[in-house]
Image (cartoon, rainbow, N blue to C red):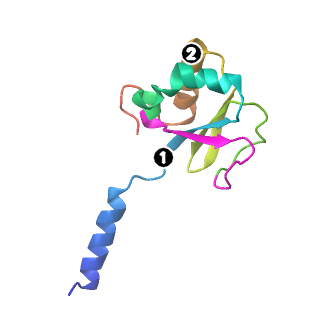
C-alpha cells in the first residue's frame, strides 16, 4: 500500500513530466481567406519543423470562434492574424500575411522582443 509520501512523489514526477505553459503562435483565420491559404501553401507545411515552430507551436482558431482561454489585447479584424501568446495571454500580433520574405523576419523579431526565444536553441 502506498503511503502519502509515495503519492506525493508520484504526483511530483507526473507534474515534472509535463512542460509548463508554453508560448504559442495562434493563427486566426477564416474560410475563404486567400491570404490564409497562401500562408498554408508557403509556410504551413514547414512551420512545425522550424526553430520558431518548435518554440511557439501553431494553434489555429476561427475568427468567429475565438476560444475563451485566449486573452487578446483587442478584437481581431483581419485574417490571417498571428498572435504570439503565453499562457493564453497575447504578447504581440502580426496582422496579415506579407509573404514568406517578410513573415519570417517579422515573426523572429516579435519572438525575440516579447519572449525568451533564441533561434540557436538557448531559449526555452
Disc 1 versus disc 2: distance between alpha carbons?
A: 25 Å
Q: Position of residue 28 (x, y in %)?
A: 67, 37
Q: Quadrant of residue 51?
A: top left
Q: Nearer the viewer, mark 1 or mark 2?
A: 2
Farthest residue to the bottom: give it.
1
Q: Along the polypeptide, which appears first: circle 1 or circle 2?
A: 1
State the residue position of label 2. Answer: 100
Q: Position of residue 46 (x, y in %)?
A: 45, 25
Q: Quick check: 53 above or below 12?
A: above
Farthest residue to the top: give it.
101
Residue visible at 48% across and 46% down in the picture = 22
**Disc assigned to residue 30:** none
Q: Position of residue 119 (x, y in %)?
A: 41, 26
Q: Quick check: 61 above or below 96?
A: below
Q: Quadrant of residue 7?
A: bottom left
| Start-end of magenta stretch | 54-69
Q: Residues within 10 Å of mark 2 (few under 14, many from 20)?
A: few
Residue 42 located left or right of residue 121: right
Which residue occupies the foreground of this view, 4 or 34? 34
State the residue position of label 1. Answer: 22
Residue 7 located left or right of residue 111: left
Q: Position of residue 39 (x, y in %)?
A: 59, 23
Amino acid at each position: 500500500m502506498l503511503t502519502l509520501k509515495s503519492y506525493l512523489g508520484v504526483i511530483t514526477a507526473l507534474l515534472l513530466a509535463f512542460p509548463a505553459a508554453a508560448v504559442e503562435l495562434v493563427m486566426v483565420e477564416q474560410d475563404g481567406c486567400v491570404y490564409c491559404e497562401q500562408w498554408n501553401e508557403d509556410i504551413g507545411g514547414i512551420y512545425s519543423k522550424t526553430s520558431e515552430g518548435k518554440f511557439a507551436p501553431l494553434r489555429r482558431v476561427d475568427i468567429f470562434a475565438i476560444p475563451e482561454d485566449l486573452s487578446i489585447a483587442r478584437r481581431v479584424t483581419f485574417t490571417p492574424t498571428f498572435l504570439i501568446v503565453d499562457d493564453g495571454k497575447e504578447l504581440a500580433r502580426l496582422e496579415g500575411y506579407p509573404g514568406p520574405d517578410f513573415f519570417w523576419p517579422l515573426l523572429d523579431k516579435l519572438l525575440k522582443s516579447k519572449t525568451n526565444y533564441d533561434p540557436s536553441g538557448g531559449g526555452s
